[in-house]
Image: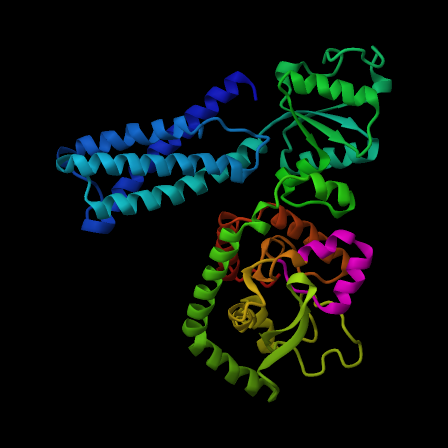
Amino acid sequence: MKASLQTKTKLALLTGDLVLLTISLALGTYVRIGQLWFSFEENSLATALCLMGYPLSLYLTRAYEVQPEASSAENLRRPLLGLLFAAIATSFFFYFAPAYRFARGIFAVANVLFALFMVVWRLWFFLRLRRRSLTVLIMGNPAEADTARQLIRQFSPSSRIHTWRPEADSQGSPTSLAPNGVPGATEDLDLLILAGASLDQATMRKAAAYRVEGVIVWNLLRLFSEFAERLPAQYLDERWLATAEGFHSLNEQSFQIIKRLVDITLALGGLILTSPLLLMVAVLIKLQDGGAVIYSQERVGQRGETFRVHKLRTMVGDAEEDTGPVWASPGDPRATRVGRWLRKLRIDEIPQMWNVLKGEMSFVGPRPERPPFVAALQRKYAVYALRHLLRPGITGWAQICCPYAASEEDTLLKLEYDLYYLQNASLLFDLRIMLKTISTVISASGSR
């Protein structure tokens, strides 16, 4: 990142943090004592301490040194660590100087609000930073370079894109790590994309020259991951899996335990709160055609083990008697009138909370598919089996990002989002998915 842009980025983040911290203190006061603002006479020192101490703690944890090449999780880890240190240090000061402190309730609420605001603010900021107008150089095979160009145009349409090939370079194959001769001077280049699994020596030498000059270098997979937030299955193999970053949460016991506790709490509370709705919907389904209320179907779960998933019935009885297993689709003619509304509002998914309580599913994870479809897709795509590393979910990154899976091609696209989730799984990512799911349900944009 260029020096001028680094300075602007740090100032923007600092300004945003100060504004959000001030808002958090004001809202914390309102929540606890019913006043929208705090008294500067009574809390002037505490306010000044927070407005100086928190940015200082964030600076010391390098929260303002944004790395565009790092993941959002890595860029969030440091500000959250800085917030934790600031909260602990400020609490110690307030303990030894009680005459100058905020009330404990105000301070606690303000910290929680600031943490939430900061996560949302910085996620938005990182996304804007990555997709701003960029000067990009693409080096590699023509087909993959064209794929990279289209992806950049989709997510950053104002970017300036250059392409370099050894045969087009008047200097021929370089003999030293010097970036001269490539379109766009080093100081003006934001990003270099290496497109292709196997590139010639001249291309790699020229890319290495840019790397040592401080230019960010991504391969095509990293470009998909950062811009589209999915991983194209056709470029994935055993070598990628063995060397790719991420996948840390899959084997973290703390992540698994907390995720399971959250699942149990949400499922138990959800079933209790929605029981009146389930009763009403059961009556409507019965009145529709007199058929069964609950529909159970065999699905493939964690470690490839099968289980029976439970949903409210939305289709006519014996929907696959003549056709056998077929993909569901938007506006599926097999759906009943009541079923269409249940699917649109995702009410039909509520009984799956029982599967969550039993430990067969999670709230967030890859969608559980039927055994015939899984067998066919695993024969075609070896990485499909990675979906079974985690419990399947009622909702998930693929479910909220893709259209309804009405074919093998649609399911392949969902696989690419599932693989991105597996690589970047975290509690914060789960929270993001849950919030987006709630938004989808409220807007009635339909089941995925």
State whether residue 255 is above or below residue 263.
Answer: above
Toward the viewer: 347 or 429?
429
For residue 29, say whether it is visible: no
Residue 170's quadrant in the figure? top right
User: Residue 163, how many percent across, how many down?
Assistant: 76, 24
Residue extending furthest toward the bottom: 290
The answer to whether residue 367 is magenta is yes
Determine the residue positioned at 69% across, 76% down: 334
The N terminus is located in which quarter? top right
Determine the residue positioned at 71% across, 16% down: 209
The C terminus is located in which quarter? bottom right
State whether residue 120 is above or below residue 70.
Answer: below
Determine the residue positioned at 33% across, 32% down: 54
Residue extending furthest toward the right: 167
User: Residue 122, how many percent across, how many down?
Assistant: 46, 37
For residue 116, say whether it is visible: yes
Toward the viewer: 55 or 276?
55
User: Residue 395, how many percent across, how many down?
Assistant: 57, 60
Q: How is the image coloured?
A: rainbow
The answer to whether residue 430 is magenta is no
Residue 96's quadrant in the figure? top left
Q: In the image, 91: left or right of 241?
A: left
User: Residue 364, how many percent across, how many down?
Assistant: 55, 58
Residue bounds of the magenta highlight? 366-387
Q: Main secondary structure of the magenta part?
A: helix
State whether residue 267 is above or below residue 428.
Answer: below
Q: In the image, 240: left or right of 87?
A: right
